[in-house]
Image (cartoon, coloured by chain):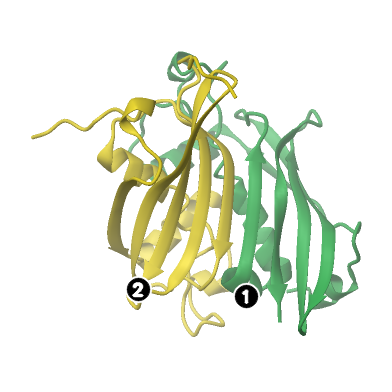
């Protein structure tokens, strides 16, 4: 079994796909998320304007990191910025496809930074949401180049 | 849903503030959620691991409280936030266990565009010492 590569500057490049996966959004997933973040709304349990239960906007709050960790050995990355664009509701019971790509890598204040895009589509290929995540790769590693 | 409140808001007006305490139990619960029910040691749950990563001690994940902001947006912007919402935030200071966060949303822009209204709020989470820990914007275009 091949060991996963370290999640470090040398193993990353702009444009690369970090990983992708498909999963079905279940009511149990939504309930667990709501409990963890304290989200309470009838839409997340039953009827909604979409015609059935939907997931909270931040349902995939950890999925980018889960995809990182499925493909790399990661320690100490710190989120600095987060952006989301919501296009369609995520319906309970639907299967979605998630993909993480690297959109930028740069050095700032002697730290290595990564910008990743997380995109989620439904089975029809429609875009449900996109998010952009900016993280410092490590607080303890010094990078020479500074911009 | 508070349509009347939203319709009457003008730039500079604020939504009612909310407060959220992020205590150890909240952090551990969130960690169990992201690990599939397992207690793990990481920068969010263990001071020693956090120090090895260059932090002063364990810190809450900045991502967790973003839900406080998105739920506020859904409360006021409704389904339009689900189908056309946006949020951009920066995590400017760590959130430590026990911090009490005040969520503020001040209308920054209210623009009309082809029969729709675009609401954009300046949003922030401020800790009990008055320091902003998360800042950014959130909003949606409502037809």
Q: Is residue A47 left or right of residue B118?
A: left
Q: Secondary structure at mark 1?
A: helix
Question: Hey, which quadrant is residue A99 in on the image?
Answer: bottom left
The colour of chain A is yellow
Q: Is residue A126 left or right of residue A50?
A: left
Q: Secondary structure at mark 2?
A: loop
Q: At x 65% / y 74%, what residue is drawn?
A: B80
Which chain hosts label 2?
A: A
What is the distance, in whole Å, between disc 1 and disc 2 at their CAs?
Answer: 19 Å
Q: At x 46% / y 25%, what residue is drawn?
A: B43
Q: Is residue B97 left or right of residue B142?
A: left
Residue B79: give its label.
1
Residue at the disc numbered 2: A94
Question: Badge 2 local density, few (<14 within 10 Å), some, or many (20+)?
Answer: few
Question: Badge 1 local density, few (<14 within 10 Å), some, or many (20+)?
Answer: many
Q: Is residue B15 visible?
A: no
Q: Where does the image place residue B74, in percent across and percent down from the top left?
A: 66, 66
Q: At x 76% / y 70%, what residue is drawn?
A: B118
Letter of the chain in green: B
């Amino acid at each position: 079994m091949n060991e996963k590569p370290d999640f470090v500057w040398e193993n990353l490049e702009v444009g690369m796909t970090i990983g992708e996966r498909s999963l079905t959004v279940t009511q149990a997933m939504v309930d667990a998320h709501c409990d963890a973040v304290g989200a309470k709304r009838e839409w997340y349990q039953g009827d909604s304007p979409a015609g059935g239960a939907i997931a909270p906007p931040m349902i995939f709050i950890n999925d980018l990191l889960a995809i990182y960790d499925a493909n790399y050995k990661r320690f100490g990355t710190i989120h600095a910025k987060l952006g989301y664009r919501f296009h369609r509701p995520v319906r309970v019971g639907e299967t979605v496809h998630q993909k993480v790509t690297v959109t930028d890598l740069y050095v700032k204040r002697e730290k290595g930074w990564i910008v990743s895009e997380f995109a989620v589509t439904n089975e029809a290929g429609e875009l449900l949401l996109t998010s952009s995540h900016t993280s410092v790769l490590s607080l303890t590693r010094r990078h020479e180049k500074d911009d | 849903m508070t349509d009347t409140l939203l319709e009457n808001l003008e730039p500079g007006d604020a939504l009612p503030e909310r407060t959220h305490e992020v205590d150890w139990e909240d952090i551990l619960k969130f960690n169990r959620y992201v690990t599939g029910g397992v207690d793990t040691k990481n920068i969010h749950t263990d001071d020693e691991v956090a120090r090895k990563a260059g932090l002063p001690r364990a810190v809450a994940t900045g991502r967790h409280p973003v839900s406080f902001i998105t739920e506020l947006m859904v409360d006021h912007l409704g389904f339009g936030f689900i189908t056309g919402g946006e949020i951009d935030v920066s995590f400017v200071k760590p959130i430590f266990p026990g911090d009490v966060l005040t969520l503020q949303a001040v209308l920054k822009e209210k623009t009309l565009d082809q029969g729709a209204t675009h609401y954009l709020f300046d949003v922030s989470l401020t800790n009990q010492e008055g320091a902003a820990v998360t800042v950014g914007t959130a909003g949606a275009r409502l037809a």
